[in-house]
Amino acid sequence: MSAADWRKAMNAGAGRYAWAGGAAGRRAAARPAAQPSSRGEEAIAGGAAAWARWIARRVRARHLLVLLAVLVYPWVATPFFTFQIGAQALALGLIALSLTFLAGYGGMVSLAQMTVAGIAGYMYAIFATSGTDISLRWPWGLAVVLALVIATICATLIGWFSVRTEGIYTIMITLAIGVAFYYLAQQNYSLFNGFQGFQSVMTPAVAGVELRAPIPFYYLALFWSLAGYFFVSYLLRAPFGVALQGIRDNPRRMSALGFNVTAHRVAAYAVAGVLAAIGGILMVWYNGLVSPGSVGTGWLINILIIAVLGGMRHPIGAFVGAIVFVLLQNFAVDLVGRERFNLLIGGVFLVIVLFSPDGVLGWWTQARQYLRTQLNRGPAAAPTQRRGQ
Amino acid sequence: MSLFWRWFWGLVVGVPAAAFVVWGLADNPKLFLTTGMNGLTLAALYFLVASGFTLVFGLMRNVNLAHGSLYLLGAYVGYVVGDRTGSWLMAVAAGFASAALFGLVLQVAVFRFMHGEDLRQTLVTIGLSIMMADILLWIFGGEIYQFDPPRAIYGRTLLPIVEVYPTYRLVLLAMSAAIGVLLWWFLNRTRVGMMIRAGVDDRAMLSAAGVNVQFVFAITFAIGAGLAGFAGVVGGTALSIAPGEDTRYQLASLVVVIVGGMGSVVGAAIGAILIGVAEQFGLAYAPTYSVVFTFVIMALVLAFRPQGILGRRA
Amino acid sequence: MTSLTRRLLWTGVGAAALAAVVAGGAIAQAPAVKIGLLATLEGPFAAGGQDGMRGAELAVKERGGVVAGRKIEIIKASSDAKPDVAVNATRKLVEQDKVDIMVGPLSGSEGIAVKDYSKTQPGITFINGSSGAQATTLQDPSPNFFRFNTEGAQWMVGLGDYAYKTKNYKKMALIAEDYAFPYSQVQGFMTEYCKAGGHVTHKAWVPLGSKDYSSVIAKLPRDVDALLVVLGGADAVNFLTQYEQAGGNKPMVGGSITVDQTVLNFKGKRRESLLGTPSAGPMADSYDGADWKKFVASYKESFKDGFPSPSLFAYVYYINMKATLDGLDAVKGDLSGGQAKYREALKNLKLKTPTGEITLDENRQAIGTTFVTEVAKAADGGFYNKVVKVVPGVNQRLGMSKAEFEKVGLGSRDVPSCP
């Protein structure tokens, strides 16, 4: 059986999501999450011309439009919007993307993604230069690499602890691990500097360009976000990603087929850990500080809110959710008063979970389908089956 | 686990623990025993909160992350009632009743329609907990509230070696033990309790046997929530009520239930004792690393017995 | 009143004025001066943050909402005592809402983070809210960050001597929360106390917000004369309750926010144990200065839902906002030229406050008065802090020379130490 045939067989059966079990979920199940494109393989095999054809087939006008918009954004927006809204949304989106990857495609909702990001941030602050005495003041490049490696190892460990139990248990365990790390960072003074954390963390300057200035930082965050997004999109179509989705849908069957379910899951945690770690370093550069508050329960849950808000059906959902979240966070004061921000975000989250489990993306998809139905002149016309995004 | 490994791990854990006990008693018996008692009384409080949580999860597979908010709700409502009526016992009753009622409403109005969607239910509870925490902060402000229990139970008792110990903590320990026995009796000697235990074992079969499953769910959620509210008043009397307490007890319940096992009330008791004692000894003897002890226990349990000490594999 | 309603109100007033101008041909009005106001309205200091905002609003009210012919527009923001949230809120106020002057934040760690941010915005003036950590103005001070309130260490000057000589506490044990502000408080107390010959034999640092002091209490040594308790809010109440229940009977010496109004007003009946506790701070409820009495009366009249007497947060936010407005008055509302003239005026300002005069030192840190107090019961049964000593002219080096002070070092978990 060829890989392509096998993939077709896998996707034909249980394509449901573990959680969107209502009517919306059944409708969604009719369209599998990520269509592995066998033509992609042709493209890889057939050289440049085949690539061009593959891109032309898959890339839509809206993709180009969005790409253009995010590239041009800093030149039309104020520095505040570029830095506090744009760059922060991208960095948070990257961390939320790691959660979307794990939860939406791996079926494991891990509340410890912000913990991994926080570990990366703390390790960076410890190895690089900051206003606190504990910092070792090593070159920033070395500090970044070390931080990423340590954070990924921690993510793998967290994964190893969490994967031997089923489904909903994962939320509890990862939340407990996340909170344990919070208390450790708060109580330990020799390494984590306790409640104060690390202040005045230095962001590097590359080739004379100060990376913390709004426009360079925005492009840095954009670069890594795009890299993360394309990496995840690619991975989901590669055998690893498809196997992961298979494990999400039916671990017993996958195990019977000879896949090492635990290994796949732990590897997924590791991949998500790398993404979250990169996001964590971006966040510590953005804030210029890292403290226990950055990895507390509030932030652990905020990442989940971001991922759910945007929709876990597609990697772009993480970034959509991050933009909505950051906008709400900054402008809620003009709506309900900053003190009631939590009420607002909790309410929005509740509404989304109750009425649109696929988040903003779900509404967008429904709106598009509705429009399409109207355009095809009358409800009798069936919505055309699009290929997977 | 084979006999050899059981002995092996028993020794690896038991010998250092025994050595620590001997050293502690020799070094400063008052501190050691006081810390031990503090650990037990904290465990009593954790048990009260965690038992409700584990019941709800065991039966309905609903990880209720708003459990801590129910604790706080019961505490505040109990405070208001106690303030108006001047009676602490009324406050306790009000705490239990208000949380139980709220839980019942939640189950019947919201969770019933999400039957089977575990993750979605959990996300709803997360949203609810955020909103409840903010609403309670709005109504009651950031101030601290203290209860006013009867003088008889709020003084100090004289005990050997420890000398003086807060009476209320001993009362708390006794109350917890009583509740534990009551719960055991309810689960093991009544019809509804039998149905709950059956449901924890096999939900589908319970339904197939003709039991009104939704009724059982509603009762269970009400009891679980009520226990949290009760613990809110009782715990708030020992340590005051303030915003932020909900997160603390939520997390404590999580860890206790992970260690003790899902769906098992006895497991919750064992987990509570382990965690409560570890936390207090850690705070007393190694304050900057106390959380590490709790975490190590949790990690060990997850590594060797992921379903918890007395849990069952789902 | 929400900031939205307030803005609508001011817009309405402005529109009416404009209409009057057009109709009457009078001279044009100067634009409103925007002042950002940041306090913690969430988390453990929520009650203090609310009162801080009341204090700032009182300062604005005293001027009728106008300074130097310009209307005052206050834009509020809230944080939850976390430095990154405070910086985000400040950045929004400065870069998005385009405030001219920034007043805040409330807590010590936030103050350090906002000070760091202020260095990136040289064209805006930042004035402190109530943050009281030493490091904010002693370590890497920022040229456009002004603090018109004395900080945590200055607030304890006089108490060390009082505890040793008047109260005769020769040995003490310390229980304090583990973050920047208590470090400063302890440094201020212990510098004097250790110099006078006292010994602090045991230090217990507890995490912020912890409620369970049983283990801390169990480890307290028996042979001390008193406890130095530097906790705030909910922590202090819990500690006192549990200490009493565990059979503790040692007298206490309180930090500036330990016997503050927020604690003396807590809704329970455990507070009898507080009578007689000495403390120190920048104000005292019972001070019989005429200006202070006027301030208290004004606070009580304006805020029926406030505390019986203004808390430390209300008072400190009040003087910082008053300084902001007095400085604007001195330059007649002229914020041009990167606010250079305004900053000069602030540096040289002799601020008249209800408790005396405040001037700034070379790091733009206030030099002011500290009051040593003791808790007493008033005729109506309420508790208040009775003044027992007044120490004027306290500077950030606590009266020592630069070399001497640097030898002691900034407060931290281990500094100072005199077991």
Image (cartoon, rainbow, N blue to C red):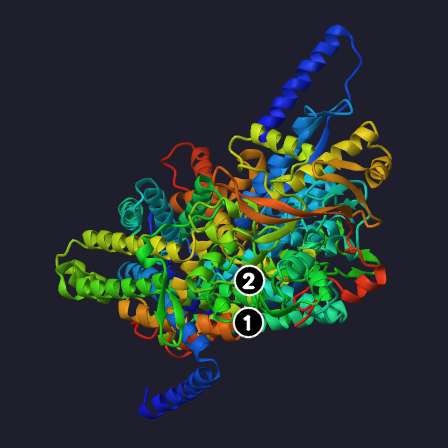
Circle 1 marks a residue in which chain? C
Q: Quadrant of residue B35?
A: bottom left
What is the spatial separation of the Cα atoms under label 2 and label 1, in whole angstroms? 25 Å
User: The residue tagged with tag 1: helix, strand or loop?
Assistant: loop
Chain of the residue where label 2 is placed in the rendered structure: C
Q: Nearer the viewer, residue C354 or B180?
A: C354
Whether residues under marks 2 and 1 lie with C-beta atoms below 8 angstroms apart, the answer is no
Within 10 Å of the Cα at label 1, are there few (<14), some (14-19), or many (20+) other Cα atoms?
few
Label 2 sits on a secondary structure element that is loop
Picture residue at 55% right of the left edge, 36% below the top: A337
| Left or right, B304 with reference to B196 | right
Q: Residue at x 55, y 71 (%)?
A: C223
Of the two numbered discs 2 and 1 on the same chain, state the one appearing first in sequence.
2
Mark 2 or 1, which is nearer the eye? 1
Question: In the image, residue C211 lies at what x, y percent?
Answer: 47, 59
Q: Which residue is mark 1?
A: C223
Q: Is residue B270 visible?
A: yes
Snapshot quadrant of residue C77: top right
The answer to whether residue B243 of the structure is visible from this angle is no
Res A255 → quadrant: bottom left
| Three-letter code, disc 1 | Asp
> Label 2 sits on what residue type?
Pro
Q: Is residue B198 above or below residue C260?
A: below
* Residue matched to label 2: C207
Q: In the current view of this chain or complex, which residue is farthest to the bottom?
A: B4
